[in-house]
């Protein structure tokens, strides 16, 4: 089952077909369908999305900066933190995934109970 339009291998049409059945078919005991989506789904299927929605906006820059610092401490210079916030558009998932990727490819390296930047700051995005 796909739970979001950005799940790997899941096409928006497939997701909408599932949600159409799951969300509109009567059930003896009721049913709640919770799905995450990028705005592109709302644009692609405005009729289906005419239901209750909880929209989560991007984090303000100060909060996104704080999230980066909470995840890796003060090891990154301010311009690099600003670049992470900019490239992630303040989306917490993207911030976490970017830092996780950096850890998996050696840009960030374990250092005791925390992390250290294992490359020169100006090469982190190369």
Image (cartoon, grey):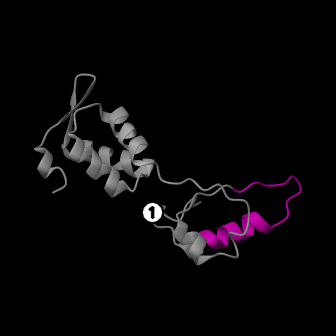
Q: Return the residue found at the far left.
A: 120
Looking at the rendered image, the quarter that the C terminus falls into is bottom left
Residue for badge 1: 8
Residue 65 in percent (x, y) is at 35, 42
**Is 54 placed left or right of 115 in the picture?**
right
Label 1: how many Cα within 10 Å (few below 14, some 14–19, many 20+): few
Nearer to me, 59 or 35: 59
Which quarter of the figure has residue 51? Answer: bottom right
Query: Which secondary structure, mark 1?
Result: loop
Image quadrant where residue 54 sits? bottom right
- Report whether 117 appears left or right of 51: left
What residue is drawn where x is 65% and y is 75%?
Answer: 46
Q: Is residue 13 above or below residue 85?
A: below
Out of 2 and 62, give the one closest to the viewer.
62
Q: Is residue 24 visible?
A: yes
Residue 18: x %, y % from top left: 66, 68
Answer with left or right where residue 24 lies relative to residue 55. right
Q: What segment carries the magenta color?
A: 14-33
Magenta stretch: includes residue 4: no
In the image, residue 90 lies at what x, y percent? 41, 52
Say whether residue 68 is left or right of residue 1.
left
Quarter of the picture holding the N terminus: bottom right
Q: Residue at x 22, y 33 (%)?
A: 75
The image position of residue 91, as x and y in percent, is: 44, 52
């Amino acid at each position: 089952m796909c739970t979001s339009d950005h799940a790997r291998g899941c096409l928006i049409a497939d997701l909408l077909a599932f949600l159409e059945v799951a969300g509109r078919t009567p059930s003896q005991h009721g049913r709640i369908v919770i799905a995450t989506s990028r705005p592109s789904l709302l644009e692609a299927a405005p009729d289906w999305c005419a239901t209750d929605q909880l929209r989560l906006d991007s984090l303000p820059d100060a909060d996104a900066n704080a999230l980066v610092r909470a995840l890796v401490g003060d090891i990154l210079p301010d311009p690099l933190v600003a670049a992470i916030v900019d490239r992630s558009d303040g989306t917490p998932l993207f911030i976490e995934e970017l830092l996780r990727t950096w850890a998996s490819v050696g840009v960030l390296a374990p250092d005791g109970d925390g992390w250290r930047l294992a490359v020169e700051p100006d090469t982190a995005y190369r």
